[in-house]
Image (tube, rainbow, N blue to C red):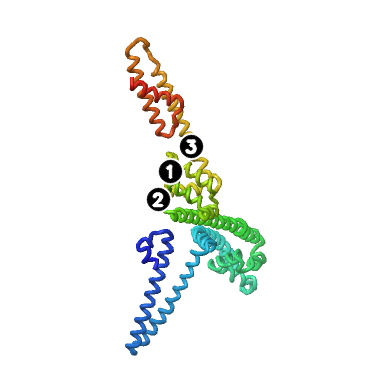
Amino acid sequence: MRLVAYRLRFFCMTGWRWNWFDAVLVTMQVFEEITMIVARVSLTDSDTEGGGNLSFLRVLRILRLVRVVRLARVLRLVRQLRTLVTSIGASLQSLAWTVMLIVFIIYVVGIYFTQLVTNERIGATAAELDSQNMQMMARYFGTLERSCLSLFQSISGGVSWEIILSPLVEDVSWLVAPLFTLYIAFSLLAMMNVVTGVFVESALQSSAEDKEEFFASQLLELIMQHGENDDGYLWAHVLEGMVANPETAQRLAALDIKKAEALNLFKLIDIERTGVISITSFIQACLRLRGAARSIDVTTMMFEQKRFLKEWQAHAARMEELVVRLTPADPAGSGAGSLTVASAASAGALMRRGSSRGFPLNAQGRALHSLEHFVGRS
């Protein structure tokens, strides 16, 4: 029904990923129903091929387990659950590198203990090989694969590392204890804590991104509900109507946007005072307004001030040069008038150029602008 209502826009509108997911699930279910009907018809028409058809139906019943995937649609409704799943998905890359690091450390340590136990067994007598400690060492460190498995079990709780260490200390050397303890301490206290920190950071970042996406989608939906915004622009009277509506004002307050803040933010973005701004710029500004100033915001403002100061200094230097040129070099000469006209024209052009760049005309600039018109009329 939604596909008929929205037509092709169904696949590219807001929430298009979930729309594609629903479309795939519905298509699979329709295909399954059609296949079941065809299989039943063929089963009734041909009794000789009944065994093959029954096998085909069994395969279809197994494929019906794909319907369980529809439970993933719950993620669309419960934002907290969606945040957890998104955080786990965002942590998969860190998980892969973590597994590689653990495997590398276990492999290196496993080679050492395997070689140590192998040398001990080579130099042992037949009676010593039958001892309980030697059999335990062969069980845990007899091959490289067993050594790696034992080392992983010792840090993951699969087996107590005291049981693994005792035969090594009793039959090989007490110096093995500090080495094995160092491996346990490094794996549990250093590596695992760092891994936990990486996962927590990834989860927090994913949660923050999900909150920003939810905020942007809710604000965009709220703006689009008031019409006149299909072209991607937000008009001043539309925003004023939004904040004046009690229901809309409550929804804005739920998004932590106050009435005065929304109107003032619109005025700040509308530099040219046209009464219209893009919806994207308004949403981005609201996102910046939600949190504290980040490093990128402070850095951007610092460099903008430096650029403004440099351009203003150049502007002041040109003004000083024009003032000198406007001073008549020959009070009695006839060239003073033409020089004044040219200088005034240059000053007016400069002031217009400075004003177009966003510099306000000060008293001196307005005087030079008036001087240009006065000399032009004369």
The residue nearer to you, when weighing 28 against 222, is 222
Q: Nearer the viewer, mark 1 or mark 3?
A: 1
Q: Are marks 1 and 2 in contact (CB under 8 Å)?
A: no
In the current view of this chain or complex, which residue is farthest to the bottom?
47
Q: Is residue 169 above or below residue 275?
A: below
Secondary element at tag 2? loop
Quadrant for the C terminus in the image = top left
Mark with earlier residue (1, 2):
2
Q: Residue 51 at what x, y percent from top left?
A: 37, 87
Q: Residue 96 at what x, y percent from top left?
A: 50, 60
Secondary element at tag 1? loop
Q: Which residue position is annotated with label 1?
A: 275
Which residue is found at the position 35% from the left and 62% from the top? 8
Q: Residue 32 at what x, y percent from top left?
A: 39, 76
Disc 2 packing (10 Å; few <14; some 14–19; many ≥20) = few
Mark with earlier residue (2, 3):
2
The three-letter amino acid code for the residue at tag 1 is Gly
Secondary element at tag 3? helix
In which image quadrant can residue 373 be found? top left
The three-letter amino acid code for the residue at tag 3 is Phe
Q: Which residue position is annotated with label 2?
A: 232
The residue nearer to you, when weighing 274 against 328, is 274
Q: Is residue 176 above or below residue 139?
A: above
Q: Which residue position is annotated with label 3?
A: 303
